[in-house]
Image (cartoon, coloured by chain):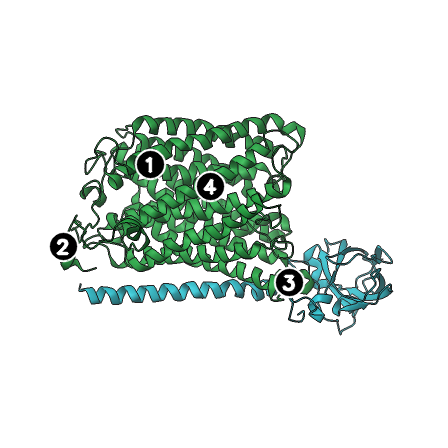
Chain colours: A cyan, B green
Amino acid sequence: MSNDDLQARNARTLKKLLIWAVAMFGFAFAMVPFYNVICDITGLNGKTSNTAATQSPETVVEDRVVTVEFITQNGAGVNGSFYAKTHRVRVHPGEITLVNFYASNPKDHDIITQSIPSITPGQAARYLHKTQCFCFDQQTLTAGEMKEMPMIFYLDPELPKHITTLTLSYTMFDVTERVTGTDNKSDTVVR
Amino acid sequence: MSTVAAAHDDHDHHHAPTGLKRWLFSTNHKDIGTLYLWFSFAMFLAGGFMAMIIRAELIEPGMQFVDPEFFNQMTTVHGLTMVFGAVMPGFVGLANWMIPLMIGAPDMALPRMNNWSFWILPFAFAILLSSVLLSAFGHGNPSAPNFGWTFYAPLSTKYGPASTDLFILSVHMMGISSIMGAINVIVTVFNLRAPGMTLMKMPLFVWTWLITAFLLIAVMPVLAGAVTMMLTDRHFGTSFFDAAGGGDPVLFQHVFWFFGHPEVYIMILPAFGIVSAIIPTFARKQLFGYASMVYATASIALLSFVVWAHHMFTVGMPLAGTLFFMYMTMLISVPTGVKVFNWVATMWRGSMTFELPMKWAITFVILFTCGGLSGLMLAITPVDFQYHDTYFVVAHFHYVLVSGAVFTMFAAAYYWLPKWSGVMPSKLLGELHFWNSLISVNLLFFPMHFVGLAGMPRRYADYALQFADYNFWISIGGFWFGLSQLFFLAVCLQCALKKGEKAEAKPWDGAEGLEWEVPSPAPFHTFDTPPVVK
């Protein structure tokens, strides 16, 4: 084989491998939406739907009772109190229930918060429907305010039989910097 | 590549620059291999020094020498230095030296890229280690990376110190270096084999490296993606891993371990190749089951892409997920078992002698198998819930990485140093190095199994009183092992200064392969005219 042939062959192999490397770099980013889709289907990360349920339940399963517990946590930057008025409710699947959450802002300036839900067991994520939730939008807490934030939900009658207790957790984050861009670290609006 | 021009200046390289320029501008696979090996050894000593600080702090309960913040930086940078600075470049160095010699090629296929891929590395580590120096001689702030070598979000994003950005840049550079190195190996093996050297005639070291190179190209870009996401999360307002913005920190673990598990095999497959070269030499038998070795290596590489979540059983996966990853992980023990079986079968009824390379190779087979077995225990999901993040895990991966990967690099060095340097490595120093390392490595890592099972968590600067005795002996083992490596430094320096018994072209009488057909030390240019392989 002549030198030129070999050079050309090397260049061809090099090009293929480089394309592969770049593609795998892209694949790392493709894992993000892929992961989200998997999570939506399986409830892998316990995220509940971010949009309000539009359909109301068809039936109420009177002979089944499921316990739903509510826990709350302050995320980074939040130091007020944040709690659910009722820590646990016992509901029939299909029954529409309202739970009020309260959050206070002891700071001397307004903060914008975003609450992130997570459900355990994750498998139940698909079966918890919210018709209204403070977590759908960012909530502004004015200085010194104690805010009442309603959440209305029902459980899908299809909820797998072995699930008898659900724990719904909310973590409240201060996203003021992200939204207003006061910190030069964050110049895009929260997704 | 000019075969005609170079044919008549076999050993007299009149056009080669000398002094510093020889190394800085080198495109010669042997020089670059030597650079890689010395760099890897330097990083091994640097990372080892950090391990000593860790073990000094843990020699008794309570706080002794460093504050917990600095302790965290030590565990983090020790891991990063050993993985990316010692083990990976060490194997790339061996590949550079040996692959062209083994397949009868005059050099690596892309010599200039080869120069680049090495010279990026010292800069990458200068950047990473500068943060440690700043932290050690500063006031704890700026802190070096302190989030563990796995740099889980949000520790490394929201809570990462300012030096995280240095870390990100340095990981990018290491990644580029590894990818270029891997591309070079593949192009060389595909295009530069001597006539008659078919794929299934290649020495196993070449095979395992070829497969490793494919793994590298597949996963190093994913690591680059992960650190890029970290960077944009930290500075450009994205929320890949930030729950507040709709991201998910667990996603980080998935992306990281999609890289991280194949990475484990990147660090061990070349070791398999080395052992498969050494055992037949000193058992004076052909390698048992050559083809099954190739297929086993390929199966391990493929399976490595579908087991990553066994590192994260405790994040809360659905049952089906944990079962899948558990069974897939256990499945890997089948091809690995094939390999161990083949090595033992090669030794079976062989005319074995126990020269230094063979001692290290046999030690590898035994201790790597120990590490593999504790790996199987960790693969069992319910059991892993207890073992997760304890010293049992630390024991496991140090058995496979230190007495696995690092020991084979010692084996390789003792085996090929005669070829590299032209002198036989000192037997006395070599024996001292071997026996001290063998005893101390077990004193160092074996008791970690027990403290791990008893519940001692990893990555803490302090521990409960009941672990005190074990930890004392672990630390003694650690210092002993660390100091034993100075024997190896002496061996290498002696060889580099050409002090010692002169080596023949084929110093081991059972050795086979093209590398033994060139004189010792291997001349600057070899196989300008390709050998013919029958």
Q: Earlier in the sequence, mark 3 or mark 4?
A: 4
Q: Earlier in the sequence, mark 3 or mark 2?
A: 2
Query: How far separated are the C-alphas under marks 2 and 4?
Result: 42 Å
Q: Earlier in the sequence, mark 2 or mark 4?
A: 2
Amino acid type at image mark 2 = Ala
Above or below, B190 against B264 in this view is below
Q: Earlier in the sequence, mark 1 or mark 2?
A: 2
Which chain is mark 2 on? Answer: B
Q: Residue at x 51, y 44 (%)?
A: B79
Nearer to me, A41 or B516: B516
Q: Position of residue B77 (x, y in %)?
A: 53, 46
Q: Is residue B254 left or right of residue B432?
A: right
- In the structure shown, which secondary structural element does the residue marked by tag 4 occupy? helix
In this view, the mark in front (1 or 2): 1
Q: Is residue B360 left or right of residue B165?
A: left
Q: Same chain for the residues at labels 3 and 2, yes or no?
A: yes
The dot on residue B7 is 2
| Residue identified by numbered label 1 | B492
Q: Same chain for the residues at labels 4 and 1, yes or no?
A: yes
Q: Position of residue B491 (x, y in %)?
A: 33, 33
| Residue identified by numbered label 4 | B46
